Image (tube, helix red, strand yellow):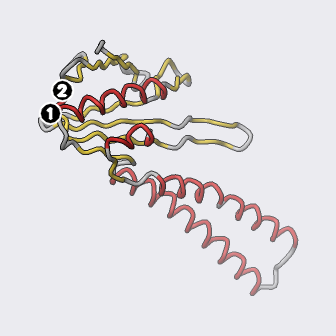
Amino acid sequence: MPNLTYEFRRSIAARTEEYSLSDSALDWSTGTAPFSDINTVRIYSLPGIQMLGAGQVVGAQQRCTIHCNSGKVIQLSSQHFLGPGNIEDRSPALIHFVNALAAQVLAANPRALYLAGMPPALWWIWFLTFGSLALALGLCILFGLVGLTMEHQNTPATFGIFLVLALMLIGPITFLRATWRRRTRNLNSGSIPRAL
C-alpha cells in the first residue's frame, strides 16, 4: 500500500501538520503511533453556525481523535486554516484518510474501540449550554406573558415582541437537537465509513 497522507493547519498560529499511514504505523513530524498501539478511534462532527442574513458563518467540522495505549492522543480536523477568516474544508480528504486508518488499525488490533459522537465532556458542555439557553428563554417568554396577562397589558405590540422571542427559541432548540444526535455510540468496523 502506498503511503496515504493528510495535512491540515489547526489555527492561524500553528504550522501545517502532515500525517501519513505506512504499512505499520501512523506517522507525523513529531512522532509515530504503531497501529497495534492504537486502542480507540473516535470520529465526530461539530455543527456549523449560521446567522440570519449572513448565511454560514462557521462551517461544520469533522474530527478524529486517536488514543494509544502509550498515552498519546492524536487529533485530526477537517478545518485547514489558510489565514484570518479563511478556512478550507478538507472533509473528503479526512474521511478518506480515517477510513484507511481504521482498516489498518482493525487489521493490527482487532480489539480496538471505534466510537462515533462527541467526547462525553464536550457533549455535556454543548448540551447543557444550549439546553440552559432554551430553558431560560422559554421561561422568560412564559413569565412575561403571564405577568402581562395578569396586569391586563395585552397589546398587539406586546404579543409581537413575544412572537419574536418565541422564534428566537428555534436557534437553541436546533443546536440542542444537533448536539443530541452527536452523543457517543459504538461502531463496528463495517459502519465506520457510514459514520463519517
As drawn, the label of residue 33 is: 2
Q: Position of residue 23 (x, y in %)?
A: 21, 19
As displayed, is residue 90 above or below residue 126?
above
Identify the residue shown where x is 36% and y is 21%.
14
User: What whole-number distance in Å separates the C-alpha atoms at marks 2 and 1?
Assistant: 7 Å
Q: Residue at x 37, y 31 (%)?
A: 99
Amino acid type, mark 2: Ala
Q: Is residue 71 above or below residue 9?
A: below
Image quadrant of residue 22?
top left
Front residue of 37/179: it is: 37
Q: Is residue 146 left or right of residue 102?
A: right
Mark 2: few/some/many CA within 10 Å (<14, 14-19, 20+): many
Tell which of 43 and 143 is nearer to you: 43
Name the image quarter holding the C terminus.
top left
Q: Is residue 184 left or right of residue 46?
A: left
Mark 2 near mark 1, Cβ–Cβ under 8 Å? yes
Horizontal side of 111 relative to 147 (left or right) equals left
Q: Position of residue 50 (x, y in %)?
A: 63, 42
List the single residue furthest toward the top: 2
Does 195 sit above or below residue 28?
Answer: below
* Relative height, residue 118 to residue 96 (above, below): below
Name the residue tied to disc 1.
37
Where is residue 179 shown, x and y percent of the image? 48, 53
Going by the numbered disc 1, the residue's amino acid type is Asp
Q: Residues within 10 Å of mark 1 (few under 14, many from 20)?
A: some
Residue at horizontal 68 percent and vertical 58 percent from the top: 168
